[in-house]
Image: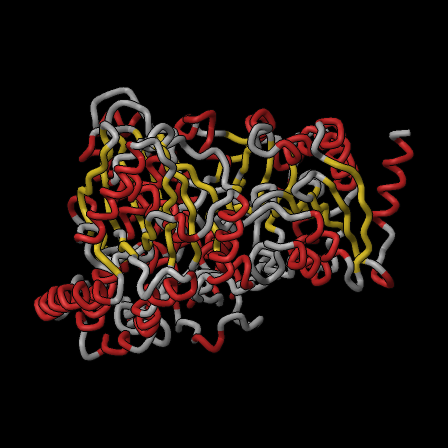
Amino acid sequence: MLKPEIRIGPRHPRLAAWCYELTRRLSERSLAGRGLHKANSDVAKRTIVKVRDKLQRGETVYIAGLACPGTHNTGVALVEVTQKDGPRLIVNNEEERFSGNKHTNEFPQHALDDMRAVLQRMGRDIGDIDAFVTTWDYPALLAMLIRTSLEEAPASLKLLRAPIAPAINLRQMDQVRRLSRKMARMYGLGEQLPLICMPHHDNHAWYSFTASPFADVSGKVAIAVLDGTGDVGSISLYVAENGEMKQLYCNQSLFDSLGAFYTVISSSQGGWTWLSSEGRYMGAAAWGDMNRASNPYYARLKAVLQLGPEGTVRLNRAMANWYADPGDNPYHPSLIEILGQPLRPDQLWNPDAVLRVEDIEHRPDTKDRLDKAAATQLVFEDAMIHVIDHLLRLTGTDRLVLTGGVALNALGNMRLLEHFNEAWFERAQQRKARLHMWIPPVPGDPGVPIGAAWLFAHMAGAPRGAPLSHAFYCGLPPLRADITAALQTDEVASLEIGNVATSEGRDAIADLMAHAVAEGGVIAIYQGAAETGPRALGHRSILANPCDPHVRERLNERVKYREAIRPLAPMATLQSARDYFELEDGASDGDYNAYNYMVLTAHSKPEAREKIPAVVHADGTGRIQIVREADDPLTYAYLKALGRRIGVEMSVNTSFNVAGPIAQTPAQAMDTLRRSKGLDAVVLVADDGTTYAAWHGGERDSGRFTGWYAAWKQARG
């Protein structure tokens, strides 16, 4: 095999660096004049003093973290802070849930309106918010965009008018310049509302550390932010000790990026758009050859990422071209020789181009594409291990918090726990230990508004606050009136079926749900505040029988209308999770809290594939979610009831959506029901506990749910 050509680093580093410094200085002044201030500015310092004084007087402080236009997944987090308890997350609203536009970069109007409704229920309003902080250091981000656009000039000049990466769009920075005045006028708060720009990776790191089970443990904790991109770089490493966090390294590059590598290849090979491709491609990898020795693409593809000294990862620009043209021409000829021509933007989502596995047993071209997915995952895992190896050696710790968008790769996360075992620690640190790792429920950008607010509270002297145990923070619990109004719609039949406000009522509803699922039903649960982040965790979930070997095909084909390649996740009690999956000791902190959020896969035990085939993926793993009674009493009761009926306290769990964001409002829930012909019923729980069932009405009524309901009522006497 010929040795691949290698070129790392940009063609014009000095020019790009000079323009970066110039742009940063000019943009700091310009944006400050428009109400956007650096975290070390005089405005920020005065705000910190004001917040600190209020806290010391025993007053309650409110801080809003804003994910603003110009980046994907806009939204807002509201944090309540006291000197006694530190920050407490009230809501973390994602605009996509309200607007219906997935990964939206729109102004978060709906998310802000919902946050205001929360404040008003508390007897407060927007004027009671003491600080507004943003999720990006916008002067640094703007300078980084200019630098990146000049690094490979003239080829990279195209980036000045096109999206540079999934996270950032230079053309939308004009919306950021108007943000302060827009919000001030919208809420009657004067001409400008001071917005404090918090560094993106610092936000990721601080939130993820303080939300972890490691926050109150003595000794060092390593923190790795592995991202698509940040405002200064795409890989940042930190260490936390004695309640303080210090940055150890930032790669200061938007394209020497694990996230960009995975995004571009998963899209241009898998056939999906950016931000929709990564999870699908990870699922596809399980169907390919995941053996480094035999995979036909791995040995050549790994040259795309050059793994250097001290944990560095550098893009081989002789093979990849996404540093200059990520959308239209992401490959150089040497990469085309390995992977073939990339799919064009106009081919994405085309059924003939999108990677599927319906014909995996008799279509060589499909099998070939799956081997490419496996090779991509293997190269990605090599790079993850390389970075973390250096970080653990540098810090000398065995505790790791992993965050950033890359940390959504649940399979890669499991590989880290497997790789950094007792043998590795014996060799590298000469001690008996193994890696202990935690990933937050929202490691990607929807979690950064929380981090910005929590970090600012810390800067004002607030204690860290309590770790997170669940992710139910998006929006308000549905009002009974809103549910009943949504049920008054064509093609939907409904019935009030009880109230979960008491333990007896909750157990009865849970048993009805379990009865329907055990009889082959597919139902959705809609209750409380929605999950924040990309995973449905029992408040906006579709549920089915994990013991049914045909349920994966049925759900993908008739309920979700998605590729057969997609796995289904197991939702389980802790005991059932232990019974059927090999839970890693390295994820045992906080009573296996890392398995609460579907960010970590686990190997199934031998008997699992026969007993629960619907939730064991092609590679024998499951992206598990453990449910706790204290965090979600109804879903926990459903799992216990299902265990009594099918012999295992485990359910299929997939998100309550069809080709869009997870259903947020009762109206969206009913719209999802109408669009999903294979969904038998939706169970909706109002804020007062009143519970309804809705199903297809009129000519579409199969009679399945009403039959189950009648049989259940009769059995209960």
Residue 304 place in picture, x, y as percent: 28, 60
Q: Identify the residue at the far top of this view.
A: 432
- Identify the residue at image location x=55%, y=33%: 626
Q: In the rendered image of this protein, does residue 470 appear above or below residue 25?
A: above
Q: How is the image coloured?
A: secondary structure
Q: Nearer the viewer, residue 182 or 710?
A: 182
Quarter of the figure with residue 376? bottom left
Q: Residue at x 22, y 42 (%)?
A: 49
Query: Which of the 4 image quarters holds residue 333?
Result: bottom left
Q: Does 610 appear above or below 526?
A: above
Residue 341 location (% of width, % of height): 39, 73
Q: Quadrant of the N terminus?
A: bottom left
Left or right: 147 with respect to 325? left
- Residue 116 seen in this snapshot: yes
Which one is in front, 395 or 430? Answer: 395
Residue 337 in the image: state x and y as whole percent. 34, 69
Which corner quadrant holds the C terminus? top right
Q: How many marks?
A: 0
Name the residue at 35% across, 55% down.
Answer: 298
User: Can you give x and y, in whole percent of width and height, for residue 291 in the image?
Assistant: 41, 47
Left or right: 692 in relation to 214? right
Asked whether the viewer can see residue 616, the reply is: no
In the figure, is residue 20 to the left or right of 241? left
| 16 relative to 271 in the view: left or right | left
Q: Is residue 143 above or below residue 583?
A: below
